[in-house]
Amino acid sequence: MVRFSSNGSTSAFVRRIHPTWRGVRLVGSQRPTVFLGLLLLLGGGCQSHRDSAPPSIEFSKVPPAAQGGRERVDTISGRVANARPGQKILVYARSGPWWIQPWPEQPFVTIQPDSTWSTSTHLGFEYAALLVNPDYHPAPTLDTAPTAGGPVAAVSTVKGTGEIQVAPTVPIKFSGYDWTVRTISSDRGGLNNLYDGDNAWTDANGAIHLRIKRREGRWSCAEVVLKRSLGYGTYIVTVHDVSHLESAAVLSLNTFDDWGGDQHYREFDVEASRWGDASSKNNAQYGIQPFYIPGNVAPFVAPAGTLTHSVHWEPGRASFKTVRGPSTRAEGPVVAEHVFTSGVPTPGTERFQFLFYVVASEKSPMQHDSEVIIDKFEYLP
């Protein structure tokens, strides 16, 4: 607190605050007037300092570190400092990609008068809270952790608590390799599908069967993942006839790296589907991610009958080919082929996987249970 003194020390105080005022004599009514202006100047500076203080976010409750799934939710909470009026909180959880929480259609969390915030979230390995302007339009998923800038005033990330919990899987052997079968739900294809361990099995001939079935009003799908990463080399998969698939069904043969968001999860695909559009001429495609970049998808027509698909992955190059019939070395009458030389990922911890799932479609929604058979998987270093 600044006090006025009766001994004329105001002038000395002013000189200490602003040395260039030395020698200026304040007399009579000038003293309180000038001093009042000085107080306003100092007060305005304090307010300006408070206004310019950067916003920050802290966490008071963090959910466990666990593989995501629509059936597992918890509460995440925290506090904001120096938020501006109208700003809100957004929360992402990372399980593979960063998924907005708790739902894409309900992303914004209101900051309470005491600066606290709280929302439900599906579980993930990490969590991110964003302080955003009211006109911000968030992406439902992100490949990499969100950062501050523009309409995003602040970002804070935190790892989930405790040891990482991985969802239980069902082991399966196929073509001499160890695989696991997914048992928790997923949002692939814009539709929340269930995944059951009994939707994948091998028969007496060693072929693997993948099934889509209706369960309690929802589609239960199949995902089978190789237990180890193989890296550069040639991947060969022989598949029975898939010309019978409904347009909303997808068979995807791909690599995927849960920790590879900086390289779009190191995903490249051979996919059989019409993506919910029964009128589409093409029923298959090759692709590398992200799919929305021109040139990253090469559609083609997959004929009826057994087909063998191959991908030769090398530095800066991914060569896809499909031939008719079973083929150990992907040799035979060529159905389609394509080479990608841009955006090709480098190896990391990606693993090869088979997915058989349902996409959302208003034109041609899935109607019936379905099954596909994969005869053989082969890898050539």
Image: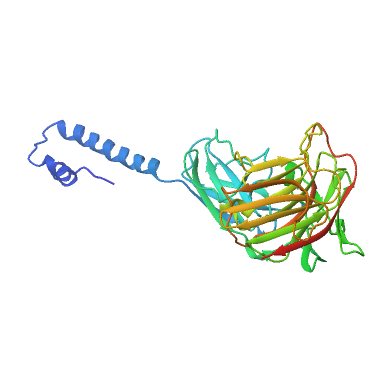
Q: Is residue 20 above or below residue 235?
A: above
The residue sitting at 64% across, 65% down in the picture is: 162
Quarter of the image where one finds residue 110: top right
Q: Is residue 124 visible?
A: no
The image position of residue 274, as x and y in percent, is: 78, 38
Name of the residue lying farthest toward the right: 204
- Along the line of sight, which residue is nearer the eye, 284 or 79? 284
Q: In the image, is 74 to the left or to the right of 133?
A: right
- Res 137 seen here: yes
Can you tell which quarter of the image residue 358 is in?
Answer: top right
Question: x%, y% of residue 83?
Answer: 49, 42
Residue 75 image position (x, y, % from top left): 67, 52
Residue 143 or 237: which is nearer the viewer?
237
Q: Is residue 152 left or right of residue 351?
A: left
Q: At 63% from the left edge and 57% from the top edge, which residue is drawn?
A: 313
**Residue located at (64% from left, 51% from top):** 97
Q: Position of residue 94 (x, y in %)?
A: 63, 53
